[in-house]
């Protein structure tokens, strides 16, 4: 279990993380999202003891990272695949990780196969592509078979097949009981694996929820096609609806049910050519809270 409790961290007089509290239960994946500069990486680095907090703390199975008997057997971390020792060969790096983690070096070979880097075992780190370095960093993270993971943008540099592979690996780790804190700018991918979501912006916690509760709370949107879109928009607003989209004949309304939209249209003589409900995605919720326009990824 990972717990972040009242964590606050400042640099140069500016607060980067402000009293952030959340937890990651065993057997759960928490998607950690927010704009660039929101404080995600600072939170993760501080939790792992790489930065000293101004106040608050982070616990892994009830202990701070620095007080764990063998931290790398309790916590697997990927923060920067570019920080791997560049002149070591892939297999040499993993054998080194095995040695400092107190793991049999034979596991290095097995882990290379798990991350599908067997053919690159003799290549030096500096010769690997970004996607291959990400796989190698993940191999180092799982070397000690820890119960907790802190993964900062592990999807970076992976091609579509690599993303699919990582998705499968994350779900395997979760189903084995691991607690996984996972940050990514690719909201659509997070939505496929995360059980819960934590959103921060300007260092402040904005949202903490399970995806199931989020979907129920956000409710569905109603998409309508009509020749009299302007009238429908006006009456929907007066009735408490929020206009998510108004594009020609198409109108998307949040905050009203399909039945309520149908009744409003009938009451005001608006003929509907199409009416259907749409579920709300995590990306929609992100846009609504952070008030940022994104194109496939969060920037």
Image (cartoon, rainbow, N blue to C red):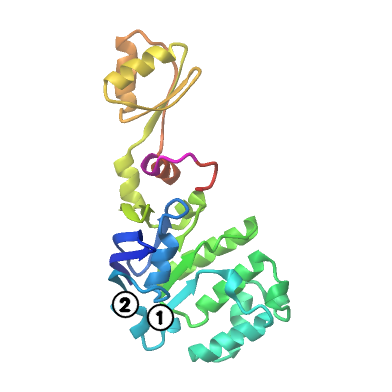
Give the residue at x 49% y 88%: 101
Callouts 2 and 1 close, C-beta under 8 Å:
yes
Q: How many residues crowd mark 2 within 10 Å: few (<14), some (14–19), many (20+)?
A: some
Give the residue at x 61% y 74%: 136
- The x, y position of residue 52, in whole percent, is 36, 74
Horizontally, residue 160 falls left or right of residue 240, namely right
Q: Name the one closer to the observer, 106 or 100.
A: 100
The disc label shown at residue 178, or none = none
From this view, report whether residue 144 is shown above or below residue 116.
below
Asked if one can make out residue 41 in the rendered structure from this viewpoint, the answer is yes
> How many angstroms separate mark 2 from mark 1 (CA)?
8 Å
Horizontally, residue 137 falls left or right of residue 147, namely right
The disc label shown at residue 74, or none = 1
- The x, y position of residue 254, in whole percent, is 35, 30
- The x, y position of residue 171, in whole percent, is 47, 64
Q: Quadrant of the N terminus?
A: bottom left
Segment colored magenta: 288-293
Q: Circle 1 sits in a helix, a strand or a loop, which is it?
A: helix
Q: Name the one closer to the observer, 122 or 173.
A: 122
- The residue that mark 2 highlights is 61
Residue reaching furthest to the top: 269
From this view, report whether residue 234 is shown above or below residue 7.
above
Q: Name the one closer to the observer, 91 or 205.
A: 205
Give the residue at x 65% y 65%: 130
Q: How many residues crowd mark 1 within 10 Å: few (<14), some (14–19), many (20+)?
A: some
From this view, report whether residue 48 is shown above or below residue 183.
below
Asked if one can make out residue 175 in the rendered structure from this viewpoint, the answer is no
- The x, y position of residue 49, in whole percent, is 39, 76
Q: Name the one closer to the observer, 96 or 274.
A: 96
Asked if the stretch drawn in magenta spans residue 251, the answer is no
Quarter of the figure with residue 232: top left
Q: Circle 2 sits in a helix, a strand or a loop, which is it?
A: loop
């Amino acid at each position: 279990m990972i717990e972040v409790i009242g964590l606050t961290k400042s640099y140069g007089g500016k607060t980067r993380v402000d009293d952030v509290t959340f937890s990651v239960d065993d057997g759960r994946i928490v998607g950690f999202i927010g704009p660039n500069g929101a404080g995600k990486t600072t939170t993760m680095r501080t939790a792992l003891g790489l930065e000293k907090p101004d106040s608050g703390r982070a616990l892994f199975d009830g202990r701070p990272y620095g007080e764990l008997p063998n931290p790398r057997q309790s916590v697997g971390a990927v923060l920067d695949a570019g920080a791997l020792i560049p002149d070591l060969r892939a297999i040499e790096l993993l054998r080194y990780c095995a040695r400092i983690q107190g793991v049999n070096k034979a596991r290095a070979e097995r882990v290379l196969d798990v991350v599908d880097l067997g053919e690159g075992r003799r290549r030096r780190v500096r010769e690997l592509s970004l996607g291959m370095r990400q796989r190698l960093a993940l191999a180092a993270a799982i070397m000690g078979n820890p119960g907790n993971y802190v993964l900062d943008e592990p999807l970076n540099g992976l091609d579509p097949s690599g993303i699919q592979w990582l998705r499968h690996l994350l779900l395997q780790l979760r189903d084995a009981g691991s607690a996984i804190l996972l940050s990514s700018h690719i909201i659509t991918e997070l939505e496929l694996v995360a059980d819960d979501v934590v959103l921060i912006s300007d260092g402040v916690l904005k949202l903490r929820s399970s995806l199931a509760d989020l979907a129920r709370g956000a409710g569905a949107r109603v998409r309508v096609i009509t020749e009299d879109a302007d009238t429908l928009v006006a009456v929907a607003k007066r009735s408490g609806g929020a206009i998510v989209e108004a594009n020609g004949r198409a109108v998307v309304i949040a905050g009203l049910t399909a039945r309520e939209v149908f009744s409003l249209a009938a009451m005001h003589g608006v003929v509907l050519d199409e009416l259907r409900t749409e579920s709300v995605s995590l990306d929609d919720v992100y846009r609504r809270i952070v008030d940022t326009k994104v194109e496939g990824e969060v920037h």
